[in-house]
């Protein structure tokens, strides 16, 4: 087990390095830097001025060197300009040139400064991740049990009426991306002119104008059912369909196995066959799927946070990309990739752990 | 259960009919099936695939699935009709009074549950036994099925056991509740013959120990003879003959039973003087059954106007013991008339040397450890193989799984290169030449026929196209039209209608596919053909026809045939010389007569004893090997066979444990790789004796 | 003129779709009649789910084909006074209505959705086809040979798959990146695969008869490279093959995201199929590796691949919608469904129709594709 883990972690680190380098190169492309120069310096800078700004602010030189600096394995740049002011990667308002450390990259915990939020990137990311954490937690709490139950129920008797109804539901939700389901949910539940809210208001069942809130901005301060249900459901719906279909496929396959017949012909009752014999074997595959859902959940998070204006990680990513905030976008990417890789690792290890056939061979 | 009289039958099936329903039509699977099993009796159900024997078993368990339905008749178990029971009532009977054992032991055990829990579940359900007591009982039953170290096995997961051990666990599970009736559906088909022999012995012993009645389903007549008291022969959904084993075997009264016995290679059959008689035609598909007798179109005694007019009932044979046949003409047939002997052929003289292997070795490096990494290990798949093969000759290569016969085929074909040693093929050394580097001529002269008929043809290419492709690649034929013509000639050669050229493989039966495979192999005028178990996946009646075809083509083309098989009956029938392999070693090599008569290598001796023979005259000495075949990854030191050898004590000084035995060359070039002294070898007795008629 | 009531709106729309209905009826009738001779496609009509999916998909396909006839107004035309007009609002100075209302720029929502279908249904299948070619061409050798090649290719595939899609789009589909030439470089690599695929396919089959081989491979190379030069480098002198740089960027990114998944599927199937006896038969008669991969293995992998192809078109449609939703890489005028939803969502709670209509359109198309895939899977497993 240990060699397997070590190898797996090794591959993961290699992947993380490669990916972060790719992201670094893509965010630090020359046009992006020029744009940065014009926003940070002045819009009317000449092309030469732009080039020298880039050079003076440590964005010149080889991509690999700059990546090394950002990572914190190459000493940060230091430059003294004509006026004798020494500036450098590690020199800030609070840290003088003399006191500055040689290395200051993400390995040292220095993620740079966001140009949009005007604060250290690490702080922005931490805050926003916290907000998104709540969203993800509720999504998981809704999505996982619901989808597993749907999958198991429809998979245990393939072709039955329950199966047909639940499968159709699952297919319909997988066909509905978040930006579609979000729009529909808002129109039905959170529009003052259409859907059920006008009716409810007319009958006097709700005090406000709409049943649910169309934005989740207020959830940043306090999460309530009314401001959080729609965003959570929007993300969860898509995932429910997908995981439920995987679970169903896995369950139907298990139900045709010979050992299920053995159990049945041993005289085990149907519910016991499901609980004792089928479930454990059927849930191995969905476990992996749930873990591998994270990249896609992240997608959903970005869409939903934009749609419902919830200032979390996804919203930040859009802001960073839209405003050419290189350091922030870079940090967002690294965090996203890191989350994905860790869940992949958990998925692999979990698969081995859940499956005695692999664990003990 | 108290009102059941033990002198009455335990299982009584009367006029049972079962159909499967698809969207298009109803497919009758079993029609008018009756049989009776008395307490303590074991009943065999025998027939070819698709005859409905497994369906009967599942109907007894009332587990026909969504599409299957019992459309008529009754199944009485201890006097109670199973066909009218509710799910709840059935559940109390399943596992406790009727238990079932299946073909695939690995698939029938839950991979995620410990063996102990799976066993203990049975008494916990049916007798509300406490878990601790149930586990104690499980431990005792595991010892009963002769598994070593029961405590370890209780805690093990199924995949940690070998195939033979798994099947023993399945049997143990069936015996946990001491059922009155045990249904065994091809319980040994997935196992090696020497392992099979052990399981069969166990089943017989346990049957008599617990007084369990058995319903034993098999396609193998030899096994039925070994295990059963009575049998029921099925053909295309119907029982055609039933009776006690000796009477059905020796005094059969149905033409199908007779034809079946004539098509299997029993001792005494010989490819030149006593060739097998294949049953003509094909097994009818369920929706294309003829009126009247299902076997009619293939029967030698068919009489128009009698056999094809209406349903035929079972007719009891007077004076025999509950013997009945579904034949209208059985009284008219002279059952003692000798079979029409097929065409007798001359044995062709042995021709020039075409293939010579000299001290061939093939090792693989594999990484051990579950997750990659770990130490590299060397698997010795082939260890010092030396033999010769001549034109016109059939050399059989016999062995069970892991003996290295497939590796040997790969190296010879050039899919792998040898680690060391030499292969001389038509005056050319090819041991280091992979197939890409061999010239077209060499490749087309050395071809292969594969084992699995359902896998040997590309499912998405027409039959004709596949043969034409072989012609193209072998550079035969001048243009497309010429190649089409050659392809049709090849179809003629394997006795398939020319219209088959446009068929897709799925429209062909197993035997027909195998014929196409043979045609494809001979497309380039092959001189040496490696046949890897070419008939083992086919039904017995088809086996004879395909074997005959191979022999015919061999005689015409003067081909050298390397016939890989684990089935000693067919090997004895068709081969000139035999090479026995065990764990990568050639343990015995000689002419067929030499190998099948003493002195034997101890492994050959056990193998001969293990193969079931469907002939009541044959008397066998029972030699059951202990344990399983060791893994090729982890072979024992010294003699590869020492872990299971019953002669080991006769070799002084524990030589078998430490030293690899030398090859002893006996009279007539007969080679045996064994430490036994010449006297000990000479003192061996034959395993098989045929009682004088 | 009076505004139309909802039943009237639907009636008018149904009339507008007449070429689609005609084509659908003809297709279904012909297919039902000949279904026993049409293989897997014919069997699709045995499954209710599959047939419903097929009809929905074909509805949109025909809508895309006949879009010019169906639309009632220029999808880009803005008519004054019809900003955010409700569905069924009559258009002053004509005898027509804005059947599904107007959007925030006073354009006809109905015509835009119909035209959007054409856009979606040209890009999504084309991108999926290219992704399949890339995935197959790389997945076959990875699965067949294994070893270092497999390790390397799988590592790269996993790299791409570890990117959250949205992030990849934000990095790859930007005006800045277009000026660096990265999309063209990607296109140069990705578009090469179809050419390689077809040439190798034909060569491995016909190399035994050189005259045929030279003809087939020559023709496919000529057409392939011609299209390649036009699409990837915009260097086709005749101008037949050309792609707008915006579109190229979107297209390439979508292919790039999809190809690794296809690669993984193909690799998995090949690893399973390569142990079959017919593969061994090919090897023992000395066939080349590519013949075995392309002609012995690939045709037998078609079942799962066709199913995945349908699902993947749906997935690509969703991806394109996502791109539109974030306003990435598409021109602001574009009637494609994703950007229309994005435009509409700002006033969602007051005027829902400009966003809901394309949302429902996209959902129904993807649903149709999923149902179709499900039907195909069910029917192909029945054999």
Image (tube, coloured by chain):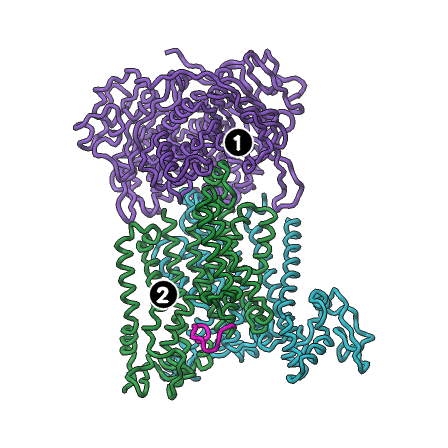
Chain colours: A cyan, B purple, C green
Task: List x then y, in percent, for residue C181.
Answer: 58, 68
Q: CA distance from mark 2 to mark 1?
A: 53 Å
* Residue B140 visible in the picture: no
Q: Is residue B284 left or right of residue B672?
A: left
Name which residue lies at 58% across and 62% down. Answer: A340
- Relative to residue B532, is residue A295 depicted above or below? below
Q: Secondary structure at mark 1?
A: helix
Residue to which mark 2 is pinned: C61
Q: Is residue C340 magenta?
A: yes
Q: Secondary structure at mark 2?
A: helix
Name which residue lies at 46% across and 21% down. Answer: B392
Which span is picked out in magenta? C329-341
Task: List x then y, in percent, for residue C358.
Answer: 40, 73
Task: List x then y, in percent, for residue C366.
Answer: 41, 65
Residue B409 has which mark?
1
Q: Pick the quarter of the image with the C terminus of chain A.
A: top right
- Relative to residue B397, is residue B349 depicted above or below? above
Q: Is residue C86 magenta?
A: no
Q: Is residue C81 left or right of residue C204?
A: left
* Residue C186 visible in the picture: yes
Front one among B414 and B280: B414
């Amino acid at each position: 087990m240990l060699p397997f883990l070590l190898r797996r972690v090794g591959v993961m680190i290699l992947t993380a390095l490669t990916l972060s380098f790719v992201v670094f190169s893509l965010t630090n492309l020359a046009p992006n830097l020029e744009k940065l120069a014009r926003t940070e310096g002045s819009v009317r800078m000449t092309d030469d001025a732009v080039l020298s700004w880039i050079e003076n602010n440590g964005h010149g030189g080889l991509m690999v060197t700059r990546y090394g600096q950002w990572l914190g394995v190459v000493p940060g740049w230091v430059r003294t300009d004509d006026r004798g002011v020494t500036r450098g990667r590690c020199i800030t308002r609070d840290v003088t040139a003399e006191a500055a450390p040689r290395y200051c990259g993400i390995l040292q915990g220095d993620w740079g400064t966001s140009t949009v939020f005007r604060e250290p990137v690490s702080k922005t990311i931490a805050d926003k991740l916290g907000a998104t954490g709540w969203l993800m937690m509720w999504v998981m709490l809704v999505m996982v049990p619901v989808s597993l139950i749907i999958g198991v129920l429809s998979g245990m008797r393939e072709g039955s009426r329950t199966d047909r109804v639940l499968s159709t539901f699952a297919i319909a939700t997988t066909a509905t991306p978040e930006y579609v389901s979000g729009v529909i949910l808002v129109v039905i539940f959170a529009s003052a002119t259409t859907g059920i809210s006008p009716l409810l208001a007319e009958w006097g069942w709700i005090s406000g104008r709409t049943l649910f809130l169309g934005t989740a901005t207020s959830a940043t301060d306090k999460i309530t059912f009314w401001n959080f249900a729609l965003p959570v459901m929007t993300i969860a719906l898509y995932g429910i369909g997908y995981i439920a279909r995987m679970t169903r496929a896995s369950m139907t396959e298990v139900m045709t196995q010979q050992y299920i017949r053995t159990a049945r012909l041993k005289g085990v009752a149907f519910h016991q066959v499901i609980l004792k014999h089928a479930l454990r074997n059927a849930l191995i595959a969905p476990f992996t799927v749930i873990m591998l859902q994270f990249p896609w959940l992240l997608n959903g998070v970005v869409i939903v946070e934009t749609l419902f204006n919830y200032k979390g990680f996804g919203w930040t990513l859009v802001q960073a990309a839209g405003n050419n905030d290189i350091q922030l976008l870079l940090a967002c990417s690294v965090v996203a990739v890191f989350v994905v890789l860790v869940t992949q690792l958990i998925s692999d290890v979990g698969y081995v752990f859940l499956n005695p056939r692999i664990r003990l061979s | 259960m108290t009102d059941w009289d033990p002198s009455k039958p335990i299982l009584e099936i009367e006029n049972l009919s079962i159909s499967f329903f698809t969207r298009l039509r109803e497919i009758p699977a079993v029609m008018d099936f009756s049989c009776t099993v008395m307490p303590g009796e074991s009943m065999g159900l025998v027939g070819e695939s698709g005859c409905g024997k497994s369906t009967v078993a599942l109907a007894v368990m009332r587990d026909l699935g969504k599409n299957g339905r019992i459309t008529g008749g009754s199944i009485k178990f201890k006097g109670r009709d199973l066909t009218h029971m509710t799910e709840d009532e059935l559940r109390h009977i399943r596992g406790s009074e009727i238990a079932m054992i299946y073909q695939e032991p690995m698939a029938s055990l839950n991979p995620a549950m410990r063996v102990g829990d799976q066993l203990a579940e049975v008494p916990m359900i049916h007798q509300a036994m406490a878990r601790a007591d149930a586990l104690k009982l499980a431990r005792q039953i595991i010892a009963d099925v002769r598994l070593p170290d029961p405590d370890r096995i209780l805690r093990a997961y199924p995949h940690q056991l070998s195939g033979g051990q798994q099947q023993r666990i399945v049997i143990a599970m069936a015996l946990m509740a001491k059922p009155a009736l045990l249904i065994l559906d091809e319980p040994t088909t997935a196992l090696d013959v020497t392992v099979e022999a052990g399981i069969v012995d166990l089943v017989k012993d346990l049957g008599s120990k617990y007084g369990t009645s058995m319903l034993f389903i098999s396609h193998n007549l030899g096994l039925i003879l070994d295990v059963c008291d009575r049998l029921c022969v099925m053909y295309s959904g119907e029982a055609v003959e039933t009776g006690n084993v000796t009477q059905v075997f020796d005094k059969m009264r149905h033409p199908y039973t007779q034809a079946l016995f004539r098509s299997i290679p029993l001792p005494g059959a010989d490819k030149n003087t006593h060739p097998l008689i294949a049953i003509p035609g094909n097994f009818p598909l369920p929706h294309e059954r003829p009126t009247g007798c299902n076997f009619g179109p293939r029967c030698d005694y068919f009489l128009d106007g009698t056999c094809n007019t209406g349903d035929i009932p079972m007719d009891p044979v007077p004076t025999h013991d509950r013997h009945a046949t579904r034949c209208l003409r059985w009284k008219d047939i002279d059952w003692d008339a000798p079979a029409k002997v097929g065409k007798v052929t001359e044995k062709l003289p042995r021709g020039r040397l075409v293939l010579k292997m000299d001290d061939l070795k093939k090792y693989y490096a594999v990484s051990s450890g579950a997750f990659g990494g770990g130490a590299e290990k060397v698997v010795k798949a082939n260890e010092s193989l030396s033999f010769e093969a001549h034109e016109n000759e059939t050399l059989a290569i016999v062995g069970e799984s892991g003996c290295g016969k497939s590796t040997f085929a790969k190296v010879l074909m050039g899919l792998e290169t040898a680690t060391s040693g030499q292969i001389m093929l038509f005056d050319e050394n090819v041991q280091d030449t992979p197939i890409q580097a061999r010239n077209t001529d060499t490749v087309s002269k050395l071809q292969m026929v594969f084992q699995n008929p359902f896998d040997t043809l590309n499912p998405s290419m027409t039959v004709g196209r596949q043969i034409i492709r072989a012609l193209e690649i072998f550079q035969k034929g001048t243009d497309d039209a010429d190649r089409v013509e050659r392809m049709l000639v090849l179809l003629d050669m394997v006795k398939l209608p020319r219209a088959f050229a446009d068929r897709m493989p799925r429209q062909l039966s197993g035997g027909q596919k195998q014929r196409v495979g043979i045609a494809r192999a001979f497309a380039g005028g092959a001189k040496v053909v490696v046949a890897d178990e070419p008939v083992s996946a086919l039904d017995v009646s088809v086996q004879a026809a395909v074997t005959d075809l191979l022999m015919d083509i061999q005689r015409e083309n003067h081909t050298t045939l390397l016939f890989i098989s684990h089935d000693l009956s067919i090997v004895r029938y068709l081969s000139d010389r035999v090479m026995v392999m065990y764990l990568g070693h050639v343990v015995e090599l000689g002419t067929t007569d030499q190998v099948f008569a003493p002195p034997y290598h101890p492994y050959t001796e056990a193998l001969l004893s293990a193969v079931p023979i469907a002939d009541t005259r044959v008397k066998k000495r029972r030699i059951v090997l202990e344990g399983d075949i060791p893994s090729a990854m982890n072979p024992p030191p010294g003699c590869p066979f020492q872990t299971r050898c019953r002669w080991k004590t006769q070799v002084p000084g524990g030589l078998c444990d430490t030293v690899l035995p030398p090859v002893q060359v006996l009279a007539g070039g007969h080679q045996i790789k064994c430490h036994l002294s010449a006297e000990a070898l000479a003192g061996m007795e034959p395993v098989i004796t045929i009682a004088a008629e | 003129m009076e505004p139309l009531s909802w039943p009237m709106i639907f009636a008018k729309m149904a009339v507008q779709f007449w070429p689609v209905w005609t084509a659908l009826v003809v297709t279904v009738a012909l297919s039902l009649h000949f279904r026993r001779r049409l293989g897997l496609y014919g069997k699709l009509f045995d499954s209710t789910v599959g047939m419903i999916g097929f009809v929905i998909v074909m509805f949109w396909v025909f809508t895309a084909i006949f879009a010019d006839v169906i639309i009632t107004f220029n999808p880009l035309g803005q008519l004054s006074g019809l900003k955010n007009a409700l569905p069924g609002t009559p258009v002053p100075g004509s005898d027509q209505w804005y059947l599904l209302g107007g959007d925030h720029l006073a354009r006809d929502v109905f015509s835009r959705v119909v035209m959007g279908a054409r856009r979606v249904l040209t890009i999504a299948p084309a991108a999926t086809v290219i992704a399949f070619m890339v995935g197959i061409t790389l997945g076959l050798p990875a699965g067949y040979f294994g070893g270092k090649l497999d390790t390397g290719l799988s590592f790269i595939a996993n790299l791409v798959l570890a990117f959250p899609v949205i992030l990849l789009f934000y990095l790859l589909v930007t005006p800045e990146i277009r000026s660096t030439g990265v999309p063209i470089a990607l296109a140069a690599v990705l578009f090469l695969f179809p050419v390689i695929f077809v040439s190798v396919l034909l060569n491995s089959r016909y190399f035994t008869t050189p005259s045929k081989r030279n003809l087939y491979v020559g023709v496919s190379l000529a057409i392939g490279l011609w299209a390649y030069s036009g699409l990837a480098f915009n260097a086709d002198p005749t101008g037949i093959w050309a792609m707008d740089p915006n579109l190229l960027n979107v297209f390439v990114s979508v292919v790039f995201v999809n190809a690794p998944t296809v690669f993984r599927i193909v690799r998995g199937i090949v690893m399973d199929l390569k142990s079959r006896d017919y593969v061994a038969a090919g090897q023992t008669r000395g066939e080349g590796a590519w013949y075995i991969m392309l002609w012995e293995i690939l045709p037998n992998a078609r079942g799962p691949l066709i199913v995945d192809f349908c699902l993947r078109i749906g997935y690509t449609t969703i991806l394109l919608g996502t791109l539109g939703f974030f306003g990435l890489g598409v021109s602001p005028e574009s009637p494609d469904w994703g950007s229309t939803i994005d435009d509409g969502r700002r006033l969602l709670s007051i005027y829902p129709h400009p966003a809901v209509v394309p949302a429902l359109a996209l959902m129904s198309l993807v649903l149709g594709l999923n149902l179709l895939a499900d039907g195909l899977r069910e029917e192909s497993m029945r054999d």
